[in-house]
Each structure stands twice: as C-alpha cells, then as structure tokens.
Amino acid sequence: GQNIDQPTEMTATEGAIVQINCTYQTSGFNGLFWYQQHAGEAPTFLSYNVLDGLEEKGRFSSFLSRSKGYSYLLLKELQMKDSASYLCAAFISGGYQKVTFGTGTKLQVIP
Amino acid sequence: NAGVTQTPKFQVLKTGQSMTLQCAQDMNHEYMSWYRQDPGMGLRLIHYSVGAGITDQGEVPNGYNVSRSTTEDFPLRLLSAAPSQTSVYFCASRPPRSANVLTFGAGSRLTVL
C-alpha cells in the first residue's frame, strides 16, 4: 500500500525558518512533490525531487532521502502570505503513474 | 491559455439527485484526473484518463462515472448523490508519460443534503 505522513499543523513566526517533514512508504516510488494550497484555493506546485539531496528555489528548499523514505520542505524568511497548507505527494511509477497525496500540513505564520 | 476550468464552483444537491461536474483544459494534456479533498483525508484520486477514450479507476471510484470523448474534456458524473459525496472536487491534468506537474482547476464544492 501507499502511506504518506506529515504533521497536521505547525505554527511559526514571521521572518523565521520552518521545516515541514514528510515520510513515505510507497511501492514504485519515483519522486516527491510539494504543493502549496491556500484556504479555498487549488494546490499549486512548489518542488519536485527525484534524486537524493537538497534543491533550493528562492526562499523554499526541498530535501529528499530515498533510502530513508523522508523529505522536508524548508521555508526561510517566513512571510504572512506563507500561511497555507503544504501537501507532500509521491509520484508512483508503473501502471498509471499516479500521484498520491499526504493529508497536508497547515502552517500558520504569526507576527 | 485558461489552464484547467471547472464548473460549477458550488453546488447543493439532494440525496439521490444526479449531476455532472465539468472539467476542460486547453493545454493539450493527455492525462486528466479527478480528486476529492476532505478534511483530514487529503486529496484522493477518484478516476483518471491517459487519453481520449481511455479511463480507469483511482482509489475511491465508487459512486462516480467518467468519460473522455475528447482530449479537452473530462466530466465527472454522480448518478445518485449521497451525503458521503459532500466534498471539494479538483480536476487536474498534466502532460503524459513523465513526472510533470499536475495543473489543478479551481475546485468545485459539492454539498449533498
């Protein structure tokens, strides 16, 4: 089966750094997505990791360890607009190459 | 390009009624899919299609039908709505045969009374 775990909620202070963790147990794992979803809106793409290591994209970075089944999303210099849910999703190959989502982490940024 | 367009944005149904959620994309994406999103459950795949005339079931297909007569359109049908189908529905598409990014529609909020 497929299992993706991430914390339900997190709170962080404006200007700070926050790390959102994601662990996964999936067969046919091909890569790991992170999406951002503001309340009442559609998910939007943040990052995709296939190889182990850290990928940086502006204030956001994403890390993957395939051997540990672990990923994290790092948000630096937090802004109030970063308050949103962050969805971890595994790309599964074989069959129909589906994307399986975790339940999401709701991040609240406080002044 | 409009991207992925979903209609309606909001709908209220009574138990037993039928309806169709529409999804259209203008990016020539072969892969299209429907997800539902419920509190504490995350996004769950209902049905997907890898091209015109080809559809298959996802994780939670019961109570839903789909068809794919054109590359652009992928409607989701509820034949006899149940309160358990109260949810937010997202249509998403991507180019085929690679881990390309899913582009989501704005979502359709359905309430079944």
Image: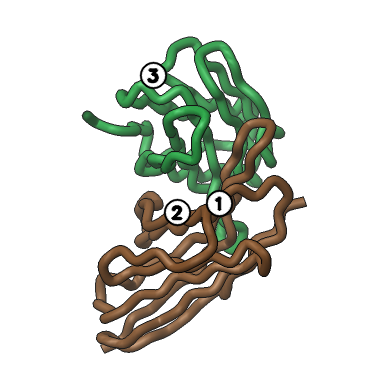
Chain colours: A brown, B green
Q: Amino acid at mark 1?
A: Gly
Q: Position of residue B45 (x, y in %)?
A: 60, 41
**Based on the displayed image, in which of its 4 quarters is residue A37 positioned?**
bottom left
The crowd level at tag 2 (other Cα within 10 Å; few <14, some 14-19, many 20+) is: many
Mark 2 highlights which residue? A48
Q: Position of residue A5 (x, y in %)?
A: 64, 67
2 and 3 marks on the same chain: no
Element type at marker 1?
strand
Q: Residue at x 56, y 42 (%)?
A: B112
- What's the mark number on residue A31? 1
How far apart, in angstroms, are the residues tagged by discs 2 and 3?
A: 26 Å
- The nearer-to-camera label among 1 and 3 is 1
In the figure, A46 relative to A96: above or below? below
Q: Earlier in the sequence, mark 2 or mark 1?
A: 1
In the figure, A37 relative to B70: above or below? below
Q: Position of residue A46 (x, y in %)?
A: 37, 57
Q: Nearer the viewer, residue A7 or B112?
A: A7
Mark 3 highlights which residue? B72
Q: Chain of mark 2?
A: A
**Is residue A45 visible in the rendered structure shown here?**
yes
1 and 3 marks on the same chain: no
The crowd level at tag 1 (other Cα within 10 Å; few <14, some 14-19, many 20+) is: some
Q: Amino acid at mark 2?
A: Tyr
Marks 2 & 1, CB-CB < 8 Å contact: yes
Q: Looking at the figure, which quarter contains the C terminus of chain B? A: top right
- What's the mark number on residue B36? none
Of all residues, the one furthest to the left in this rendering is B1
How far apart, in angstroms, are the residues tagged by discs 2 and 1?
A: 7 Å
Q: Residue at x 58, y 61 (%)?
A: A103
Q: Chain of mark 1?
A: A
In the image: residue A93, left or right of residue B28:
right
